Image (tube, rainbow, N blue to C red):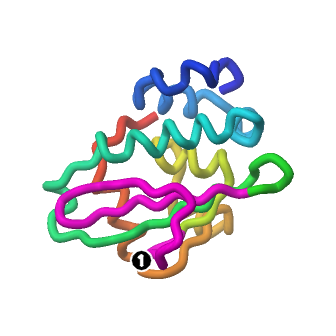
Amino acid sequence: MTDIDPTSFATMSASEFAQTVKKASDKEINAVMGGTHRETILDAIFARFPSLFNAEKAKGADARVNWRITGGPDNSSDTYAVVVEDGTCTIEKDPTVEPTTSIMLGPAEFAKLITGSGNPTMMVMTGKVKARGDLSVAMAFQNWFDTPKG
């Protein structure tokens, strides 16, 4: 993970990102995603959600999922909302509307969860991922996207 050049991250494909995450240690992921380029990396990741969204798989879904990623500089966190409604997917940075589901996790857990290289059930059971709200949405969420796996 430490070989990622944050200035070119936006051009890295989702598949390349997934492979990079799979090869990296939690420590490496946390260092890169907890450093000065964190905002650039998170913005690029969340900007991809709408293009990976599969409206057919999310047919009838109406949900707002807030992702709070901890482990930022000075122990900060960042929150993004992925909003699925009327067959569309949009992203909001620093959302203010109450979510259907809220997920809180560290940078390594986030990267592994969205790339399929981590076990979501184990992450929740061990307390590395905390979810509140409509948990059925949290469980269905990953199926609404055609995301390359690590």
Q: Residue 110 versus residue 77: which sits nearer the camera?
A: 77
The percent position of residue 19, horizontal first and vertical second, equals 50, 27
| Segment colored magenta | 77-102
Q: Residue 7 versus residue 59: which sits nearer the camera?
A: 7
* Residue drawn 68% across the image and 54% down it: 106
For label 1, the crowd category at 10 Å Cα-Cα, with few meaning under 14, some 14 to 19 and many 20 or more, is some
Question: Which SS type dominates the magenta stretch?
Answer: strand
| Magenta run includes residue 78 | yes
Q: Residue 52 versus residue 120: which sits nearer the camera?
A: 52
Residue pointed to by mark 1: 100
The percent position of residue 144, horizontal first and vertical second, equals 28, 55
The percent position of residue 24, horizontal first and vertical second, equals 65, 30
Question: Is residue 60 rendered to the left or right of residue 29?
Answer: left
Question: Is residue 124 rendered to the left or right of residue 81?
Answer: right
Q: Does residue 44 lie above or below 136 as drawn? A: above
| Magenta run includes residue 11 | no
Q: Does residue 40 lie above or below 58 as drawn? A: above
The percent position of residue 18, horizontal first and vertical second, equals 48, 32
Mark 1, secondary structure of its residue: loop
* Residue drawn 33% across the image and 65% down it: 140
Tell me the amino acid under the disc marked 1. Thr
